[in-house]
Image (cartoon, rainbow, N blue to C red):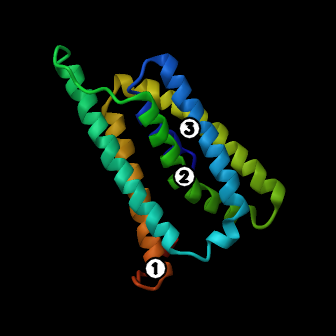
Amino acid sequence: MAADNAIIIGLIAANFVPKYRKQIILWGVAGALVFKIIFAIFATYLFEFYFIKILGGLLLIWIVNDLRKDLVEMKNKVKTPTKKSKAPSYIHSVYKVLFADITISFDNVIGVVGAAKGYFGFMIFGLVLSVVLTGALATYMANYIQKHIWIAYVGLILILVVGLQLIIGGLVDLEILKINEEFIKYF
């Protein structure tokens, strides 16, 4: 479940030199920890508002589109190094990482809190493990994306799927949409 956080943080951090890449990953991991703790505290209350899932899914789709634009710019910069392309700003990228953390941390917390089944210790362990995995995977993804840009597009597709799952799940929870019982576990 930490993979979606790591993919977004890695995609954003891949545009920067290693010094700034590490700082963006650090901001992303810290943001993931803070937002996961906040969402875990309020998880039972937030479960009552199904529109939050829909909003989270829409925000993820917006983030995917924004990251897709960054990838196109990064690809163009590699193809034509003499052409001046607008590099993403560090502050804008930190904001983007924190915004993505808010959106994605919610679904991570839902999974962790659900799996813990009321055991506080298991919930804390799951949240800490999720944050540690996010940091490790984000560092790896940022370095890997620099060499293999195709993996970034695979990551964007995975994040798009998560966003669509949140939207469809929220619509099902609100009873606006009905899906076959066999597929309900995916939403």
**Residue type marked 3:** Gly
Q: Secondary structure at mark 2?
A: helix
The one of 75 and 98 positioned closer to us in this rendering: 98
Quadrant assignment, res 55: bottom left
Q: Residue at x 45, y 68 (%)?
A: 54
Q: Residue at x 41, y 27 (%)?
A: 14
User: Residue pushed farthest top?
Assistant: 82
- The residue tagged 1 is 172
Around disc 2, counting alpha carbons within 10 Å, would you say few (fewer than 14), some (14 to 19), or many (20 or more)? Answer: many
- The residue tagged 2 is 102
Q: Looking at the image, tell me whether mark 2 or mark 1 is earlier in sequence order.
A: 2
Quadrant assignment, res 59: bottom left
Instruction: Please tell me the numbered disc located at residue 28.
Output: 3
Give the alpha-carbon distance from disc 3 to disc 2, as whole Å: 10 Å
Q: Is residue 105 above or below residue 181?
A: above
Picture coordinates of residue 84 (x, y %)?
20, 20
Picture coordinates of residue 89 (x, y %)?
39, 29
**Residue type marked 1:** Val
| Image side of residue 97 versus residue 131, left or right | left
Q: Secondary structure at mark 3?
A: helix
Q: Secondary structure at mark 1?
A: helix
Q: Is residue 119 above or below residue 12?
A: below
Q: Residue at x 42, y 81 (%)?
A: 180
| Image side of residue 153 versus residue 126, left or right | left
Picture coordinates of residue 159 (x, y %)?
41, 51
